[in-house]
Every structure is written in structure tokens, then in C-alpha cells.
Image (cartoon, rainbow, N blue to C red):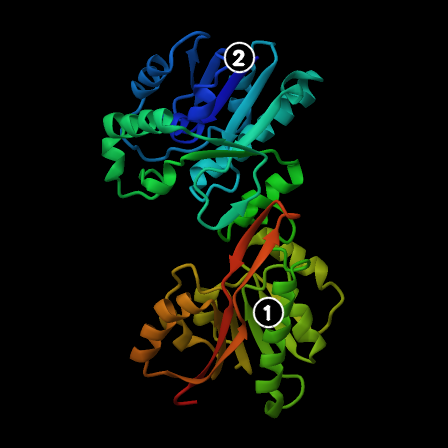
Amino acid sequence: MIDIVVVLRAEDAVLDFLSVLTDDGGGETRVILADRAETLVLAAGMEAPERLALIASHVGPVTDGITSPGPEVLATLLRRAAAGGPCRIWAHSPADNRRSRGRLGRDTALARAADAEDSGAGLMRTELRHAVGFSPYLQILSDLDRPLGPEHIAAKLDFVNGSCGHLLAEADPEFVVQTPRVPAVERFFDTDPEQRERLFALLASLDDEAASVVDPWEFGSSRYEARRLDATAAWVRERCADLGSGSALVEVGACEGALTHRLVAAGFTVRATEPNAVFRSRLTAALAGTDAVTVDGADLAELAKEDAPRATAHLLIEMLYYGQDLGLLDDLATDLVFVALEPDALASRVRPWLERSTTWRADEETVLVPPQLETVCAGRAYLSKRGSVGLLLRRTNG
């Protein structure tokens, strides 16, 4: 049985898969280096020091643009490495917060599935396990844990200090080697396609990778998210109660409409804006036939430039995490802005700006939901939902 280890860079093979490279079975191991589209052959009977020396010779400096070569290239590399025989495939986690590794883990699984469709058998009959690896945001339930003994730990540290010294001081968080990225217990898990895609999307930002599955943040199934959304809608309804019925709201970054539905049910007219085309198409479909809602693709910068009728309020709910220029709020066509963020982001992003602002003052601050631990991806992992704090901003000259 051949073991095939698929990694982005050579050092990853030792940091996350040393137990595979030094398995007592002593069989052949092949290491696919995705950044080079190259396969290293570690012959059966090759001693661990010799294997690590071969891998060390391929550790290089960090260069720009290192990423997964894509499922098609990986499928070719996997077929060649398997050579028609039985094998076990080991790859990065699709939920690795280093996006380059997460993408490669996902693409390896897609390559394996595509090969099966093309050949009618092929790699689909192989085992595929993902390394939990460095996972600061998710605790993933593993299926196979391999504690490393003192000898293996010494070999791993010698490899890092001898071959990866430049990575200990690397500035790029994608490639720096620090203590948590040198695990003493190597943990692995199996997953089905749906869980894999959800794990991958969950760690994505607001791009098409996040939109690769419907409801990537599980607003429709999470008890925490339901509480947060209900509390947010109730907060907006209560603060707008004195402004008359049919108040017009602009919801910025409406995603797939989980909050929009609640706002409409509360009697508001809503302009739901969503720049991501995939999310926007789902938002439009979900709200089809709802006269109280209009949908468009404006982002915060575009809204600030518009010469639009004044809205009762703009809603910036859980969306100011991405470096937006908060000065754009000054040009929104409204005198009220509802902001909701997790507490640390509110403190680091909004409060310093608000202290300097001569346009806005905080009328109210309220805890919408406290932090909570919750399972995700059908129980495959769990994480800390960090809580949500609402801040009502009123224009000082409004």
C-alpha cells in the first residue's frame, strides 16, 4: 500500500505528516509538492533520517503566488503517484486557516472524485484523510490521532531548526513556522463532500469561495445565529418604532437574506444590498414576490457616493470586518446607522474612529447575544461564536 502525501510546500510534509513518513509499516511513500507540481519518491526501507533529508533539500524561500495548482493538475499528479495500485492519500484540511493549504486540501478531494468519474474507479477507491493541522478557529473532531514520541519530536524540531530557520522569522502568516504549527500529536479526519465544502466555505472571506455552498455560516440551522438575528431585528424594530410605520431601511451586505426576512416581517421596507453576485442571486430568489424589498449590488463605497433619498436607517450588521473605510459612513443618506460586531472588533475598529468623528455619536450600546460555543458542519467541528454588540449611531447634525 502506497501512502501519497499532498502538501503545498516541502516543510508541510514533516510538520503535519511526520507520522505518515515514518510509519512502522515501512512501505513506499510519495510526497506531492503542489508548489512545484513535483513528486518525491521515498522508497520502502528508506530510513527516516534519509527521508527527512530528501524533503529538506526541497525546502525553499517563500515566493509570491504559491497556491493550489487546481483539481485537474492534482488529479494527474495523483494518478501518476498511485500508478494504478492501492494507496492512501493524506492532505491538508479544507478548513486550514492558511487559505493556500485549505484550498489545496479541498482541491485534492475534488481531484480524487473527478478521477473516479473519468475512469470509473481510479482514486475513488483509495482512502483520503485530512490533517487537522493548525486550526486556531475550529476544533475538528478527528478520526485518527498519532502522538509523537520523544524521538519523533526531536527529529521534527531538528528539521525545523536545520531546514526551516528562515521560516521561523517569516512575516507572512501563511508561511511562518511557530510552535502551534509543529504539533506533538498529528490528528487526521475523514469527511464527506458536503462537510468538506462547508468546512472550506466557513473559513473563507466574502468571496465566491464563501458562496460555494448555500448558507455557509449556517444562519438557517444555528441556534446561536437565530438568536442573534432575532435580537438584531427586535433591536431595530424597537428603536425605529417612533419613526412611523413602513420605515425605509438599507441593509448593507444582506448575504442570502436571513435578517432581511425578519425585517420585512417586522413591517419595514428594505433595500437589501449585496455585492457578491452568487449571494445576491440567492437573495433575489429567496425574496421573490416580496414587494417590501428591493435588491441590488451596491457596496458601502457605492452607497456613500449615491444621491439617494434619505433612508430611516442604514444597517451595517456583522460586516465591518474587512477593512472598510469608516469615513464612508459620513456620506450615507441617513441620520441613523445600526452597527453590530463582535466585541473585540467593535473595540478595535469602531471605537477609535468614533472618538475622532465629528459627524456621529453613539446613542446606544447593547449586547445582542453573548459568546457561545457551537457545533458546525453537522457536528464535524465546533467553534466559539464571539457574541454580537449593537451600537446605534446618530448623526450629530441630523
Q: Is residue 396 left or right of residue 82?
A: left
Q: Which residue is mark 2?
A: 80
Q: Relative to residue 161, is residue 196 depicted above or below?
A: below
Residue 334 in view here:
no
Dot 2 amino acid type: Arg
Disc 1/disc 2 C-alpha distance (Å): 50 Å
Residue at position x 56%, y 46% in the image: 201
Residue at position x 32%, y 24% in the image: 155
Q: Position of residue 244 (x, y in %)?
A: 63, 90
Q: Which residue is mark 1?
A: 228
Q: Relative to residue 213, is residue 282 depicted above or below?
A: below
Q: Position of residue 79 (x, y in %)?
A: 56, 15
Residue at position x 36%, y 83% in the image: 359
Where does the C terminus fall, quadrant-wise? Answer: bottom left
Q: Earlier in the sequence, mark 1 or mark 2?
A: 2
| SS for dot 1 | helix
Q: Are marks 1 and 2 in contact (CB under 8 Å)?
A: no
Residue closest to the far bottom: 242
Where does the N terminus fall, quadrant-wise? Answer: top right
Label 1 vs label 2, nearer the camera:
1
Residue at position x 53%, y 54% in the image: 383
Dot 1 amino acid type: Arg
| SS for dot 2 | helix
Residue 276 in view here:
yes
- Camera-side residue of 102 and 331: 102
